[in-house]
Amino acid sequence: MFTLAILLVLLVGIRSYTAFRSQIQEGEQVKHTYQVIAETDNLQKLLVDMETGRRGYRNTNDSSFLQPYYGALPKIALVSANIRRLLRDSSTQISRAYEMQQSIQNLLRYWDGLGENAGTYTREQIIAVTMHEKMLMDTVRTVISSIVTEEQGLLKEKEKKNQASISTTNLVLIGGTTLILIIVIVLVYIIAAEFRRRKLAEIELQKSFEEQEQLNQVNVERNWLLTGMTDLNHGTQGITDLGVLSESILKALVQYLDLPAGAMFLYKEDKKELELCAAVGTSKVQKTLALGEGIPGRAALQKEILVVKEVPSGYWQIQSGTGNSVAGCVICIPLWFTNELKGVLELAAFATPKPGWFDLLNGISGNLAVTINSVEGREKIMDLLGQVQIQKEELEHQQEELRQTNEELTRQTEVLQASEEELRVHEEELRQINTELEEKNESVESARAALGVKAKELEITSRYKSEFLANMSHELRTPLNSVLILANILAENKNSNLTEKQVEYAHIIHKSGSDLLKLINDILDLSKIEAGKVELTFEDVAVRQISSDIEQLFHVVAEEKEVQFDIEVDAALPDTIHTDVQRLEQVIKNLLSNAFKFTPKKGTVSLRFYHAADVASLQNRLLDKNEVVVGISVADTGIGISAVKQQLIFEAFQQADGSTSRKYGGTGLGLSISKELVRILGGEIQVKSTEGHGSTFTLLLPVYASSAVQSADKDAGHKVGDTVEKIAETVTEQTWVPDDRHNLAKGDKVMLIIEDDAKFARIVQDFARNKNYKTIIALQGDEGLYYARKYRPSAIILDMQLPVIDGWNLLKLFREDEAIKNIPVHIISAADESRLQSNGALAYLAKPVSKEDLEKAFSLLGAHLNDRIRKLLVVSGEYLKNNDLHNILEQRHLDVDCSYASGIDEAMALTAETRFDCIIVDIGKDVEKGIEEVQRLRSGFSGLEIPVIIYLDSDISAADELQLKRISNVIIRDSSFARDRLMDEMELFLYKLQEGTRKPAVPQNVALADNDTLIGKKVLLVDDDMRNVFALSTALEQQKMEVITASDGREALDQLKEHPDTQVVLMDIMMPEMDGFEAIRHIRGQLKLLKLPVIALTAKAMQGDREKCLEAGASDYITKPVDINRLFSLMRVWLSQ
């Protein structure tokens, strides 16, 4: 009922709110309609003024009549544009607006065509002009009248809707209010009934309390009885003497019942009388009593408790240190064990016995009789043991005689026992050895079974990789083959229907495709070699044949490069060698290609085949065992290789010169493939080189290579798989801290906690489970790496100081592993924070941590995992107010959650709670204070890469600008284009943040908007790769930009001197002669072009590249492959300043 009342209130409130909102919207639409009518009236007035002025001029030839015409002419376009803007929400009205615009244009063109000399007009001409003018004006008035009529109709329709809405709202309010009143009356009635029901329940509860009190009293009496019996039983346990037992029983009863005196009589079966064994609080008691004599004797015969009240003064006297008294009553309890009398217990009391006493005494009488019987039985047994001891001594005398007789036999028995003991020891040793062997055999069998499973898994993985490479080869080569064929056909231009530039484009496509095909072949070859899947065909091949083939292949190359090419074959070498000639020639071709590439004109390249008799430091063991070793050396007089890079060049994708200014291209795969091919042929490659004086690469091969070499290679080819298998076998999975690794299901959020402190790991585990994570605990670095690869957790909590593999190396391994590199890692460690900057981790917490720190860490991880909306923080100031950017964000349809802070302190509090993707700070005119505040803000999220955009309204010095660039990513000065540039920059950062995941749903028109900024602008494109030059220049020319090009930094400086009106520069970084860094420094320093926008282009996205570019003087930075839309956006930003 309460829920219904609340729902009705909510429904009435919602209906009222929606009605009010609807009325407000209707009012806005009515206002909109009146604006349209007012603008159309204004337009008609302007046209009438212009018509009147033109007619007055034609009639009088007085130019003063044209003043209204020229005064209204510039206002016509503005009023017409306002009308179109107001009517854009209606397709019918907007079409009429464009029709109106066309009619006005026709009228204006007609007026413009009449000229300004009306003195030559005849009357007939004036009438004709006036009639045509009236016809055009009537057309405009008709269109305007249709627009006004439509708007007036809409106005009447909106008024009807508004009146209907008000009526409905009144009905809802009256009906809802009536229902609420009815419900309130019903609720009052229900509450009164509930009060009556509770009063009756209170009476019933009081009765229940009284019954409970009675039960409690019974329980108290029962507990008192059980306690007394328990105390008495405990007091008699372990007593073996009748006198001590009697005294213990008597004292326990007197103390528990709070009695003044008592006596204990035991029955002597042999004397047929009761004998006093213990007494408490009595002055004198008769020592013996016959059955039936006195009160105890009578009680013994009756077999039940006897109570005597009003005891005479001379019967029993109770004495203490302060006086004596006579008991008020005497209680005698007979102790019977089955049908045997064991004694009588006599108790004296001053007052009448309580009812509960008899229950206690009846309960303990049987137990006391059993206890007395047990002690008596024990005493009889002890007497019998004494008699047995005497008989034992007599037997010992007899046994002494037998002992002397058996001593001789004993000595003989000992000798036999010693021999038997030795045999038993040997048997035990053999049994232990057998047990150990069985355990080891079981371990070996288990390991063998595990290895079998791993071998099958590795075989399946290898097969998948082979199938992938085969498919990759087909899927890449097939479309590439089509590209090469079609590009070649286009380049031939048999129909002569292509321009020279188009033919050049086709040649570039063919050349680029050929280079890509070579790179694909190299990668596939290297993959096959690493997988051990290279098929070798060993055969006898003539050395002279190899040299002849190589000479024919490279003779033309030597002539084209003007390099001397010498080949020498040692006569001492065998005529044939047993090897795979195809792979051998592939290696020699690779080495010669490198030699010719790095040897300048007039240099020398030599190929030599010889018998390598004395070769030191052979690393290949199979080669070391061969008696005859063939040496094949390739020597050149080229640039040479430094000593530190002579081993690096054999690694995949590595080059001797990998700097930004390298002069020679290449992928760095050739030598890596050559090294692996020579290894599987059973040989090795050695290199000797001096930088600047050339290099010599030497192949050392066995004269006879067998299939054993290939087998050894296949074993080596699986080294990666073996390493992974060893990790799986050597990692010991911890069991100290129980976790959820065996209870994972698809869709679970899994947290991997890598922490060597088990106690702290449990704390983090409990915290994670409270956040609905399932947890896996690793206490060592290698264990954490194994779990990360095996279970692929949602997030990782990492300590840095770990055993086996520390946290720094573990982070590196995570980032190098494609399968797990995107898992967010949060560091919680006592390690040095300075070492943790830019390490790829999501965030860092220093130990010790508090509960609030853990809350913050898990909130950050949760936000990262669930993040779908980009978060923007705007620090408001003098120019950026709260909600200033709201409309712009909505117009661009950006999925951005915008938060506002009124100052740096509030912003720091927000960054402490939320991970923002971008921060905009308005520092106004006070630059120095702004720098301090931004530095303070950045210190609050140190270690996190959050872009910062600074918005200001002040001219700044070069020093201030450099300082601002160090603490921010972009600086924007307030201007008419500042808001648009601010949005462009923000979009760029949101794109960068989402690289590798997903792009935001930015409409296509955003990327292409405002292209007018680029039209007619002159751009200098600097790149040494002509393919990139053609591709980028074509894209830029399509934007109607004027493009000039340069192939290196030095040529770029010359072009800028020749074209000082250049408005933007696109600068590649890696170029020969003068790289991009040096060229930018010369542009800023030597040419003094401090305000010329320079955008750096580079193929490397290495850490620190952005800072290097900005430090050199670049305005901005973008990586290859270039996203054209992003490049255009950057250029618009810098050209709009």
Image (tube, rainbow, N blue to C red):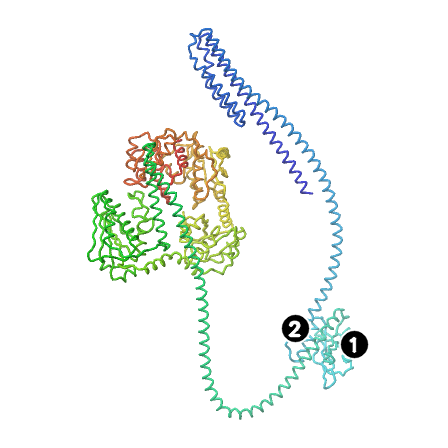
Element at badge 1? loop
Q: Is residue 2 visible?
A: yes
Count all numbered tags in the image, as a single digit: 2
Direction from residue 600 to residue 354 in the image, left or right:
right
Q: CA distance from mark 2 to mark 1?
A: 36 Å
Residue 1025, horizontal then vertical, whole percent? 32, 39
Look at label 2 and name its amino acid: His
| Residue found at x 36% / y 59% | 715
Q: Nearer the viewer, residue 350 or 923?
A: 923
Element at badge 2? helix
Rate crowding at label 2 as few (under 14), some (14 to 19) or many (20 or more) other CA atoms within 10 Å: few
Q: Nearer the viewer, residue 557 or 1023?
A: 557
Q: Is residue 644 visible?
A: no
Look at label 1 and name its amino acid: Ser
Return the residue at label 1. Answer: 313
Return the residue at label 2. Answer: 234
Residue 802 badge: none
Q: Residue furthest left?
A: 571
| Residue found at x 46% / y 75% | 431
Rate crowding at label 1 as few (under 14), some (14 to 19) or many (20 or more) other CA atoms within 10 Å: few
| Residue found at x 74% / y 43% | 189
Direction from residue 475 to residue 614 in the image, left or right:
left
Disc nearer the start of the sequence (2/1): 2
